[in-house]
Image: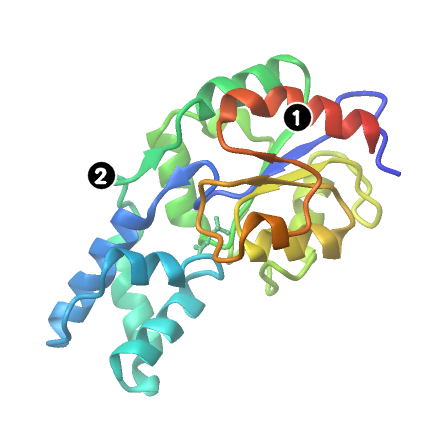
Amino acid sequence: MNICFAPCPVVFDLDGTLIDSVPDIHACVNAVLRLHGVAPLTLDQVRGFVGGGVDLLWRRVIGTTGLPAEAHRDLVASFMTRYHDATGLTRLYPNVTEALGILADRGYPLGLCTNKPLGPTRAILDHFGIAHLFGMVIGGDSLPQRKPDPAPLRAAFAGLGADPLKPRGVYVGDSEFDEECASNTGVPFLLFTHGYRKTPVEQMAHHGTFDDFAHLPLLVEETSAVG
Ligand SMILES: O=C(O)COP(=O)(O)O
């Protein structure tokens, strides 16, 4: 059971959930590929590589382009010098700011748990003026483990005052990584259907879906009341 008598913590994924970040990631990946004389990847290819963090992104880029595996570390470093504050092509999904504001006003402690490194995560939250809404932010480099390991999500809930081993709350995300992480952590999962998932919605385990953040506050209320 996951019943909360006070508003329980709500933790969000970032890429594909609050923001569409793929255009900036795509531009920075292709800028690095250009330096190595490699043909650019498409937006769809790069979208398919996002979700597991920067190391996995570049393992997938290497697998597709035939760049040498030994170059991985340098490619990631070169990407990060470009991506650490790249926000120009990134967009918040519609009604995100309003939904976060409503949940915060209703007393829900809000957190963020992303596989994106903390540097660009903070740059994006600042850029969109939503950083102050999150009481805890866990990035892909905050801990040795990354989603779908439960450790980062547990740390996010713990930072919001929940019991890290049996957290009460809700995780909101868009991908298979998020689905598995919520299940590993033992919290209900709310699935945003416009994100980067590859699996059909009907094959994903979730406690509710939404395609517009205008519907999220009610869904959170219902999910945390039912458990
Ligand atoms: O950087 C990534 O690959 C994914 O980040 P996310 O956990 O916010 O979806």
From the viewer's side, name the closer residue of 176 and 158: 176
For disc 2, the neighbor class at 10 Å (few under 14, some 14 to 19, many from 20) is: few
Q: Is residue 209 above or below residue 79?
A: above
Question: What percent of the width, then of the height, locates residue 132?
Answer: 50, 25
Task: Give residue 54's mark.
Answer: none
SS for tag 1?
helix
Q: Horizontal placement of 147 versus 60: left or right?
A: right
Q: Horizontal placement of 221 versus 94: left or right?
A: right
The residue located at (69%, 57%) in the rendering is 151
From the viewer's side, name the closer residue of 179 and 133: 179
Q: Quadrant of the N terminus?
A: top right
Establish whether ligand 1 lies closer than 8 Å to the Cβ of label 2: no
Q: Is residue 89 above or below residue 197?
A: above
Mark 2 vs 1, N-terminal side: 2
The residue located at (29%, 39%) in the rendering is 90
Question: What percent of the width, then of the height, locates residue 56?
Answer: 44, 69
Q: Is residue 114 above or below residue 222?
A: below
For disc 1, the neighbor class at 10 Å (few under 14, some 14 to 19, many from 20) is: some
From the viewer's side, name the closer residue of 127 and 173: 173
SS for tag 2?
loop
The residue located at (78%, 47%) in the rendering is 164
Looking at the picture, which amino acid does disc 2 mark? Gly
Q: In which quarter of the image is the C terminus?
A: top right
Establish whether ligand 1 lies closer than 8 Å to the Cβ of label 1: no
Looking at the picture, which amino acid does disc 1 mark? Leu
The residue located at (32%, 72%) in the rendering is 61
Q: Read off the residue under disc 2.
A: 88
Residue 125: image quadrant is top left
Q: Read off the residue under disc 1.
A: 219
